[in-house]
Image: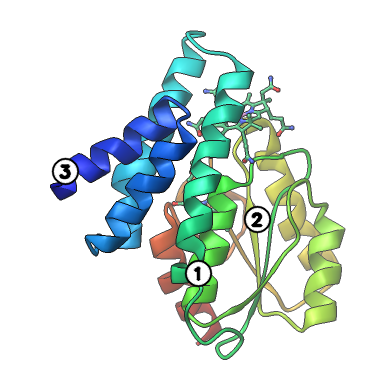
Amino acid sequence: MSNEQILADLKKSVETWDIKLAQTATQAAIDAKIDISTIIGDGLGKGMEVIGDRFDKAEIYLPQVVAASKTMEAALKILEPLMTAGAGGMKGTVIMGTVEGDIHEIGKNVCCAMLRGAGYKVIDLGPDVTAMDFVDAADENEAQIIGGSALMTTTLESQREVVETVKEMEAPYKCIFGGAPCSQAWCDEIGADGYSETANEIIELVNKLVA
Ligand code: B12
């Protein structure tokens, strides 16, 4: 099977919430040595974009989005051991979570796995994390970086709160943010230390900040 066909199957599996196809296509992609960022960016992620568009147009509803995200998660489960194969904990500690009010986790999970693979210790606080919980976890784990994901325009403000809490506590942590509605301009506005559009770029960003 060609790499194009495998990527098309990955996309289709998320679009049609076909967990079996997602699992077989992910394994086929690994066997064909397609790199992980291509599997996610040009395969599974493309399917999730279609789901987002169709949800926007009210062609599908929340249960279908849930089914599509379960499909993507099933594929990520297969990829995770490959993403986390690096020497965890050697380069620094990153506290990751989805900000308060927001339960979207898929993109944040991809970032966590990529960072672990790049040799960072990652403490994943999960979804709906308050600013104070980010700072407490950074204190407890002597972290260098706090990373907050937001997938809704309404929860971008929670990213600002994280920056403000770090400043109020006079804590030394660098704050980085991402998620679909987040941008470099937004991060500049709230005084964050970094932004990355994708999980690939997060590694370069964190390397730069802990250097
Ligand atoms: C899947 C999904 C869900 C799933 C989430 C499952 C899960 N376990 O995460 C479910 C069904 C639960 C869900 C629920 C809801 N959703 Co929803 N969801 C989506 C959808 C379709 C895809 C998101 C996704 O997983 N993308 C794939 C990942 C890989 O991409 P990503 O998250 O962008 O991550 C990448 C980068 O952004 C970056 N990144 C991500 N995080 C971080 C963090 C850092 C620190 C850095 C540096 C980088 C970084 O790296 C990642 C990998 O490259 C989006 C549509 C879209 N276009 O985004 C809507 C969307 C985000 N949802 C939306 C809405 C409205 C909701 C609900 C409110 C719906 C409802 N009526 O209940 C609820 C949310 C409730 C809440 N309080 O949070 C809206 C938000 C609109 C807005 N206000 O901005 C969207 C945009 C859909 C739409 N077009 O209307 N959703």
Indicate whether 166 appears above or below 100: below
Name the residue at the bottom extreme: 90
Q: Residue at x 81, y 74 (%)?
A: 170
Q: Is residue 208 above or below residue 55?
A: below
Residue nearest the observer in this picture, 90 or 18: 18
Q: Quadrant of residue 177?
A: bottom right
Please give the residue where the numbered disc 1 appears in the rendered image. 81
The image shows residue 199 at horizontal and vertical percentages of 45, 59
Label 3: few (<14), some or many (≥20) within 10 Å?
few
- Locate residue 88, reporting x and y percent: 57, 84
Question: Which type of secondary structure does the marked residue at label 2 adopt?
Answer: strand
- Of 92 and 62, the residue lying toward us: 62
- Type of the residue with mark 3: Glu
Q: Earlier in the sequence, mark 1 or mark 2?
A: 1
Callout 3 secondary element: helix
Q: Is residue 9 left or right of residue 2?
A: right
User: Residue 148, labelled with which disc?
Assistant: 2
**Residue under circle 3?**
4
Q: Which residue of the protein is positioned furthest toward the left in this rendering?
A: 2
Q: Residues within 10 Å of mark 2 (few under 14, many from 20)?
A: many
Q: Does residue 194 show up?
A: no
Residue 71 is at least partly visible in this image:
yes
| Sequence-first disc among 3 and 1 | 3
Q: Amino acid at mark 1?
A: Pro
